[in-house]
Image (tube, helix red, strand yellow):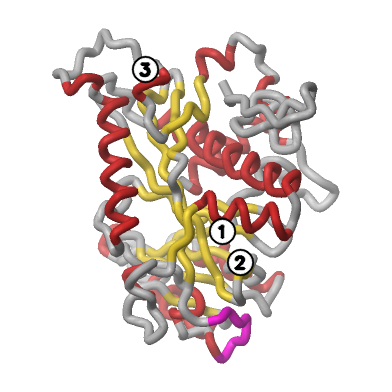
Amino acid sequence: MVKNIKRYRKELEKEGSPLAEKDENGKYIYLDFVPVTFMLPADYNLFVEEFRKNPSSTWIMKPCGKAQGKGIFLINKLSQIKKWSRDSKTSSFVSQSSKEAYVISLYINNPLLIGGKKFDLRLYVLVSTYRPLRCYMYKLGFCRFCTVKYTPSTSELDNMFVHLTNVAIQKHGDDYNHIHGGKWTVSNLRLYLESTRGKEVTNKLFDEIHWIIVQSLKAVAPVMNNDKHCFECYGYDIIIDDKLKPWLIEVNASPSLTSSTANDRILKYNLINDTLNIAVPNGEIPDCKWNKSPPKEVLGNYEVLYDEEMAQSDGPDRDLRSRPGQSTGVKGSRARDSGKPVLTTWK
């Protein structure tokens, strides 16, 4: 995902797209939504160069082949991963694939806290076709909370109950609640933010999240197998920082559908049901001649997030006009002519 996003940025730069505009510090204005990330051991030297620019920074390491928080740890010293330097200097005859690959990302050390605790968002996105891109956002996402109050203190870097929101980790904590599972619905988060930060700021935040999801899918679209008989339901993990900037942390191609609470079970049952209603209408055998735009009544809790065919009819600058903060095209953007918010769809 990260490599494709980097490639996508460079391609937009070559095309002279305003989406690839940078500020005076050389940072992307609209496409800066993924923390600085490297692959280890392959990118070890690049990582060291970046680390030395800000030696007080904290980084999070994740093994590529594991899930549910397994093997994840935080580092703030180069000495903690010197073994990767040794690995990179081994004989060229040793295949890179024989070494366990890790992703290392700059840790978001200023997360938005609720009740003093860190949380992230798990959002479900269904893609029915990549070329043209058509995707749907599931309205019933949720927030996952840590069980221990957050602290940026280096003495707590090893305390995963402070830093990792994975339920597989948190359920072993002393303060884990088995009834609600340390989860909030996205709608509850939205109500909380509207009451504490204001409605306009909250709308802008969710517009930015939808923007991130669409741009990430556009980044990978050229390398995806666009089989008409296939669909994908992705689990997007988003972290919001204390400035209400959303960051894309991870995209899961096989999000967990196991349930940890009664509400979780209902949510995921409905997710599977609504997904199949779009992917396999009427439960019939898939037909490649199907119209991939299902009628609104079968969407259930899904809503159209982006429809490339419809967007193309609006002109090539649609993406720029529909970026966060604009009033055109973004799902969830508001029209204020009538004096009352009207939901529109990013099509």
Q: Is residue 152 magenta?
A: yes
Q: Amino acid at mark 3?
A: Pro
Considering depth in this image, is 99 or 208 the residue closer to the camera?
Answer: 208
Q: Circles 1 and 2: CB distance less than 8 Å?
A: yes
Mark 1 neighbour density, 10 Å: few (under 14) some (14–19) many (20 or more): many
Proximity of marks 3 and 2: CB atoms separated by less than 8 Å:
no
Residue 50 visible from this viewpoint: no
Task: From the top left corner, tell me how far across and down residue 99 is, in percent.
Answer: 30, 66
Quarter of the image with the C terminus in it = top right
Pick whichever of labels 3 and 2 is earlier in the sequence. 2
Camera-near label (1 vs 2) is: 1
Span colored in magenta = 149-155
Provide residue 312's location: percent of width, then percent of height.
58, 13
The answer to which quarter of the image holds residue 95 is: bottom left
Q: Which residue is mark 3?
A: 294
Query: Relative to residue 281, is residue 12 depicted above or below?
Result: below
**SS type, badge 2:** loop
Does the stretch in magenta take in 58?
A: no
